[in-house]
């Protein structure tokens, strides 16, 4: 399904690694919904810590990394263009997308430590031919 073109959309094809997370307003809504003791603060903090470590390490490479708060992420697969709507992904509000023009993107949901992200990135690129 193609989303409304007026929505906030990002083209993932321009990036190798995308870290998606809620906007500040979405975070506040989740906090109201889940409660102060839900662990959301810890999840958000851990996500920021580990994703920033990866971002800093990759900033000296040719890889393009972006933090994404856009609602719609457009990406290309072998079957054509697809769309990922962050707000329709109710179970996991945080994650990373590994992307390479030679193969379909890989979505990982939740918080990963920096070592895990690097391992997944290496494995993804090694198997992407």
Image: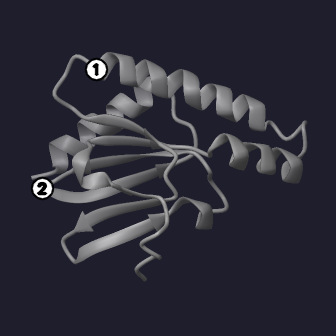
State whether residue 26 is above or below residue 119: below
Earlier in the chain: of badge 1 and badge 2, it is 1
Whether residue 75 is situated above or below residue 124 in the rendered picture: below
Horizontal arrangement in the rendering, residue 36 relative to residue 98 (left or right): right
Q: Residue at x 51, y 24 (%)?
A: 50
Name the residue rendered at 49%, 66% in the picture. 7
Q: Position of residue 116 (x, y in %)?
A: 43, 31
Q: How is the image coloured?
A: one colour
Q: Is residue 109 left or right of residue 93?
A: left
Q: Secondary structure under badge 1?
A: loop
* Badge nearest the viewer, 1 or 2: 1
- The residue sitting at 68% across, 34% down in the picture is 43
Asked whether the residues under the numbered discs 1 and 2 touch, taking CB atoms below 8 Å apart as contact, a structural biologist would say: no
Q: Quadrant of residue 60?
A: top left
Q: Quickly name the residue at label 1.
A: 59
Q: CA distance from mark 1 to mark 2?
A: 22 Å
Residue drawn at the location 35% of the way across and 63% of the way down = 74
Q: Position of residue 70 (x, y in %)?
A: 49, 52
Residue 82 x/y as whole percent: 34, 72
Q: Secondary structure at mark 2?
A: loop
> Which of the 4 image quarters holds residue 59?
top left
Q: Which residue is mark 2?
A: 102
Quarter that holds the N terminus: bottom left
């Amino acid at each position: 399904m193609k989303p409304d073109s007026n929505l906030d959309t990002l083209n993932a094809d321009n990036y190798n690694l995308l870290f998606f997370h809620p906007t500040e307003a979405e975070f506040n809504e989740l906090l109201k919904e889940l409660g102060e003791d839900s662990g959301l603060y810890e999840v958000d903090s851990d996500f920021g810590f580990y994703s920033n470590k990866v971002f800093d390490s990759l900033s000296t490479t040719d890889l393009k990394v972006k933090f994404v708060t856009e609602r719609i992420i457009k990406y290309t697969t072998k079957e054509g263009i697809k769309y990922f709507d962050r707000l329709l992904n109710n179970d996991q509000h945080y994650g990373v997308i590994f992307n390479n023009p030679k193969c379909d993107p890989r979505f990982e949901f939740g918080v990963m430590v920096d070592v895990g992200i690097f391992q997944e990135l290496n494995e993804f690129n090694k198997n992407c031919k």
